[in-house]
Structures are given as structure tokens and as C-alpha cells.
Amino acid sequence: MRNTTLRTMILIGIVISAYSCGINKNVKSNSNSELPIELFQRWELDYGMANGEKISGLPKSPSNDYEFKRNGEYLLYNADETYMTGTWEYNSNEKIIYTKRNNGELNGIVADLKPESITLVPAGKAVEGTPFENFRFYYKPKTE
């Protein structure tokens, strides 16, 4: 009898543990449900600002186009339509998206997220302490 009770308790513990892991997994994916569906498209660089002044001479699309995928991956396009990949993560408490290179290094922060525009703030070791620290890049949906 003791053996059966012990087995039952272990089985209940495993079921509760598995169920709890499943709930936590769903909570994480639901935080992305706060994001506007428009995020998951290709964005082209509209303009940039540095220290309150508009930056001239920025590359035209397709250079620097971003495309956010639902699976937490993003594509950053080059002039020849090739692209680099990275990952993105939404922080629902801060209401911002962190973009990271494939090596895990922080690449930028999408600080202002609207269906019709996003604002990218560069980040990372290459930016800290340089004039790029005060840059803001404004994106609009790419129209073909």
C-alpha cells in the first residue's frame, strides 16, 4: 500500500510539474500578443535623427530594411537584398523590443512601436560612449 501511495504522489508531482511548464510557456508567447500585427512585415528606413537634427545621406531601401518574424527572428537587409539574421524579444513591462545579433549581443531597441512606424535606438558596445549613442532611426512600412 505504501508503495502505491508513493507512486501516486510521484505521478501527481510529475503531472503538476509538466502542467506548470506548459502554463509558463503559454504566458511567454501571450506577451507577444500585445504587439500590433503590423510589426510582422518589412520596414524601411524613413529618416534618422542625431541630437535633435535630421541626418542626411542615409542609405535607401533595401539597405537597413528590417523584417520581424513571428518566431522571434529578424532580418536586416543589405543593398543587394541579402540579409543578416538576429533575434528579437519583446519586454511587455517596458513595452519595447530588444534586437540581438546571432551572438546574443544587443543590437538595438525598438523604443516606440506603432502600427505605422517604429523607432530604433542603436545599442551595444560599438555605440556606447560614441556620438551614435544619441541616434534614433525611424522606420515606416515598406511599400513595394
Image: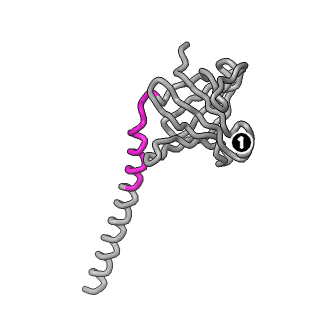
118 sits to left or right of 50: left
Residue in front for this viewpoint, 85 or 5: 85
Left/right placement of residue 5 relative to residue 56 reads left
Residue 19 or residue 11, whichever sits in front:
19
Q: Residue furthest left?
A: 1
Judging by the rendered image, the residue that carries numbered circle 1 is 127
| Dominant secondary structure of the residues highlighted in magenta in the image | helix
Q: Quick one: quadrant of the N terminus? A: bottom left
Q: The residue under label 1 is which amino acid type?
A: Val
Where is residue 140? Give x, y as percent. Answer: 54, 22
Q: Residue 134's x, y, as percent?
A: 66, 37
Magenta stretch encompasses residue 33: yes
Quadrant where the image shows the C terminus: top right
Q: Which region of the structure is painted magenta?
A: 24-38
Point 50% across, 26% down: residue: 117
In this rendering, the answer to whether 49 lies above or below 34 is above
For the point 73% across and 37% down, which residue is it? 131
Q: In this rendering, is residue 115 above or below 20?
A: above
45 within the magenta span: no
Q: Secondary structure at mark 1?
A: loop
Q: Nearer the viewer, residue 15 or 43?
A: 43
